[in-house]
Image (cartoon, rainbow, N blue to C red):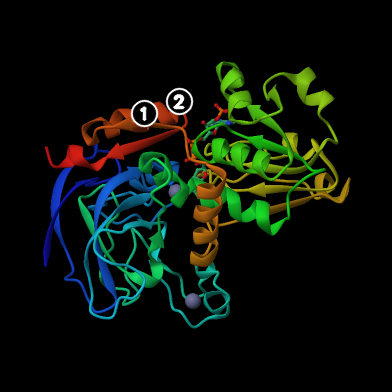
Amino acid sequence: MIDTQAYAAQNATSPLGPWNFQRREVGPHDVQIEILYCGVCHSDIHQVRDEWGGSVYPMVPGHEIVGRIVKVGDHVTKFKVGDLAGIGCFVDSCRECTPCQAGEEQYCEKGNASTYNGTEMDRKTLTYGGYSTQIVTDEKYTLKISDKLPLEGVAPLLCAGITTYSPLRHWKVGKGHKVGVLGLGGLGHMAVKLAHSMGAEVTMLSTSPSKEADAKKLGAHHFALIKDKEQMKRLRNTFDFIINTVSAPHDYNQFLRLLTLDGVMICLGIPPEPSTVPAFNLIMGRRSIAGSLIGGIRETQEMLDYCAEHNIVSDVEVIDIKDINTAYDRMMKGDVKYRFVIDIASLKK
Ligand code: NAP
Ligand code: ZN
Ligand code: ZN
């Protein structure tokens, strides 16, 4: 077994703190990755605080992982020692169901093995995430990372990047489309960058007046404050798509009005409480509400390659692991520019 240092939550209310555990030995199809950076996703906070229910403790969060391969199993073909590698939100799936066969393992009908706060496919062995010094994973669920881009900016692509890239591709967003991005945090800033790079006209819809200049630097063509009733009125019937990344409970109805005929609000944010939508608000304008979950391994690799080619990374604030609890508090206030990323070297100090 491989001794691993980590930061863990012991329950839903205490701050995260140091915790040691053991990873499995490297199997024939496994790689061992020394973790260099791990992004901090709002899903980490939802799960640490058990906002979705069913959390398992001790919990080592983190599913935006980049690092370097230090050991490979005998049958590994995709990687060699010294290569860069990445892990996203899941580390295995059933490999047999229709979504798995289609390369959409995130929708595995048996439920994939989430990178943390879950189990391996044996449904017994608990999984622990990237706020840790190393991880052992099957090469099939491990991504190749280019050495062209700064690694701390690449880490958030493994969740925030793919979660926004996948729906933009699925709905074929591009030139001629008007896209509203709701919420400028980790997912929101990647949605702005990616939608802009695909040729869409992007409007940032935010609660934070202080983020206007940044939104425009990130690639938004327009900025609107969602608390400003006049601005919201002017934007009625505007957007082909709204990418909703809001993490807190909010009313969907005020944003449905901003959609044009046949417009789609794509929900990515997973607030702990639901919003009710009267049928009328969909019927008028033949509008839809849809959802999208991260992305499969093949599409995640495609997104990483796309970002390397187009020079797209996340804008990050690199933190020491000891500052993780403060980072959570700041994210709860929307105070993030635009992803916290843990320098895992700080775990070894
Ligand atoms: P984040 O960095 O904390 O950003 C969330 C942003 O939402 C905030 O920065 C803020 O932006 C806005 N916001 C917060 N409270 C709000 C409120 N009451 N009303 C309106 N806007 C508000 O979070 P994240 O990491 O991007 O994650 C966002 C959500 O996506 C989380 O619920 C997370 O669990 C979920 N998620 C889903 C998937 C998926 O596969 N679907 C994957 C990853 C994450 P402004 O300051 O601009 O208003
Ligand atoms: Zn995430
Ligand atoms: Zn499956």
Contact, mark 2 vs mark 1 (Cβ under 8 Å): yes
Q: Is residue 291 visible?
A: no
Seen as rendered, the residue at the extreme bottom is 96
Name the amino acid type tagged 2. Lys
**What residue is at 54 percent from the left and 51 percent from the top?**
163
Few, some or many C-alpha atoms within 10 Å of disc 2 (few <14, some 14-19, many ≥20)? Answer: few
Q: Amino acid at mark 1?
A: Asp
The quarter of the image holding the N terminus is: bottom left
Q: Give the vertical position of 202 relative to 306 (above or below).
A: above
Dividing the picture into quarters, in which one does residue 198 lie? top right
Residue 91: assigned label: none
User: Does 284 sit left or right of 13 as displayed?
Assistant: right
Query: What is the CA distance from the residue labelled 2 to the residue labelled 1?
Result: 7 Å
The residue indicated by pointer 2 is 333
Q: Residue at x 50, y 44 (%)?
A: 272
Is 222 located above or below residue 193 in the figure?
A: above
The quarter holding residue 232 reads top right
The residue indicated by pointer 1 is 329
| Image position of 93 (left or right of 278) | left
Measured from the top left, where is residue 303 in percent x and y?
Answer: 54, 54
Give coordinates of residue 291: x percent, y percent: 63, 54
Task: Report the label total.
Answer: 2
Residue sitting at 30 percent across and 54 percent down? Answer: 129
The residue sitting at 63% across, 31% down in the picture is 219
- The local crowd at label 1, few if under 14, some if 14 to 19, many if 20 or more residues have their Cα within 10 Å, is few
How far across and how far down the image is residue 298, in percent?
A: 52, 66
In terms of depth relative to the viewer, which is nearer, 184 or 306?
306
Q: Secondary structure at mark 2?
A: loop
**SS for callout 1:** helix
Residue 84 image offset from top left, x and y in percent: 33, 55
Residue 319 visible in the current orientation:
yes
| Left or right of 172, for residue 114 | left
